[in-house]
Amino acid sequence: MEERTRAYLRGRFRDHYRRTEITPPPAANEREWGYIPFTEGPGTTMVRHKSLLELGSLEDFLERKRPQHVYFSVGRYRDPGASSMSKKDWRASDLVFDLDADHLPSVTLGEDSYAEMLEKCKDALFRLLDFLEDDFGFEALEIVFSGGRGYHVHVRDENVLHLEREHRREIVDYVRGIGLDFERLIETETVAGLGRKTPTERRTLRISGGWGKRIHGYFMDFVDELLAMEEDEALERLQEFEGIGEGKAQATLNAARNNREGLEAGNVTVHTAVAQLAERFAAEAVERDNAPIDEPVTTDTNRLIRLPGSLHGGSALKVVRIDRDDLEAFDPLVDAVPETFTGHEIAVDVTRGGEVELGGDTFTVSEGDQSLPEYVAAFLMARGRAEKEKEA
């Protein structure tokens, strides 16, 4: 990035902060703060180990320093401005989840557009929220568009603030489906059998929620597909599964035909072959429904995370808090465009052209000197794809 481009962005970032009210996180005085200034050269230099007391008024600090990136810690400390983590005296930490489109298995880098990547990331966000809200029952959630390629979710329920790293790791494993044990999802109940002298055990899959419900949903979809097929076709389909031969296929099909109501109720262990088939759908549920979070972010009690309301120096887009009810309609390429950068054009020298989807429009940008809407130009400059044109 050339100096005139850097100076331009710094000036316009300042203009943004002059007209933007920033709401700090809870317990802001107990958190470490950090930022990356606009500096010359390809590298970045993080200024950190600062307390809010040292920075002063957040609005004044942002207007004065005009940083490229701004962060605060998920951790809360007695002395957040201490020069080392050991001296800060940790007290608690938010539970934070980070979804980055670059790391999603469904994203193909170099093929998916920026808009397509963000859409896939939003789908993953809904899966994550399903775990956090339904499985864990968390209520104090803050959802944030990172301003770049993903989303953050901050959990501030009182019962998670003091979790150590190993307990946060368990939450990570759960939402990722790591080490999921099908047998642990089976509920065993002793029942008295009619006409039997000794009681028997009834084994059912827990389907009221959690991974059991997800597995059961995929299994029952498959059962209904089988029941809609002709017998020869259904048997052939079942034998596509490794370890299921002609005999097990027939037994499974008979169980599906004769006991669908029981299967619907979770009685997937009615027959050994059925139980083995149901277990296979655990892997499918994990593949489809797991939340592909950036695991180290969640386990790190000292992590720095982007400040909502600030600008992302790699995109010139806003870091945006999103109300849960507004998430479905939220479009990051429209709603995260800073109002400061709208309504006028500027001249830039584009060094790498291509399509840009932003502000509700698609721009086909060629290389060379040209005039573009400022929010498009700022995006390209922040991404290293354009330089501010020299003044005449």
Image: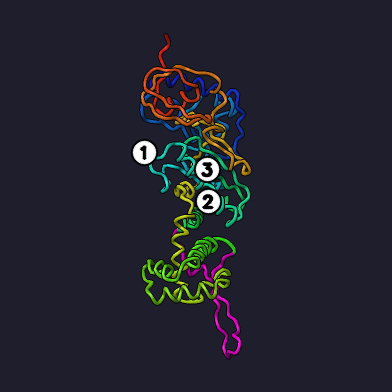
Q: Is residue 100 magenta?
A: no
- Specify the segment rendered in magenta: 178-207
Q: Position of residue 204 (x, y in %)?
A: 55, 72
Q: Is residue 259 above or below residue 107?
A: below
The residue shown at (59%, 38%) is: 25
Q: Which residue is mark 1?
A: 110
Could you tell me the amino acid type at mark 3? Answer: His
> Residue 92, relative to residue 197: is it above or below?
above
Badge 2 is on which residue? 127
Residue at 51% from the left image edge and 44% from the top image edge? 122
Quadrant (top left, top right, bottom left, bottom right) of the C terminus: top left
- Closer to the camera in the image, 248 or 201: 248
Q: CA distance from mark 1 to mark 2?
A: 25 Å
Q: Disc 3 designates what residue?
A: 152
Residue 314 or residue 171, whichever sits in front: 314
Helix, strand or loop under label 3: strand
Question: What's under tag 2, amino acid-wise?
Answer: Arg
Q: Residue 311 location, x and y as percent? A: 52, 30
Instruction: Name the front one of labels 3 and 1.
Output: 1
Q: In the image shown, does 386 or 225 lie closer to the viewer? A: 225
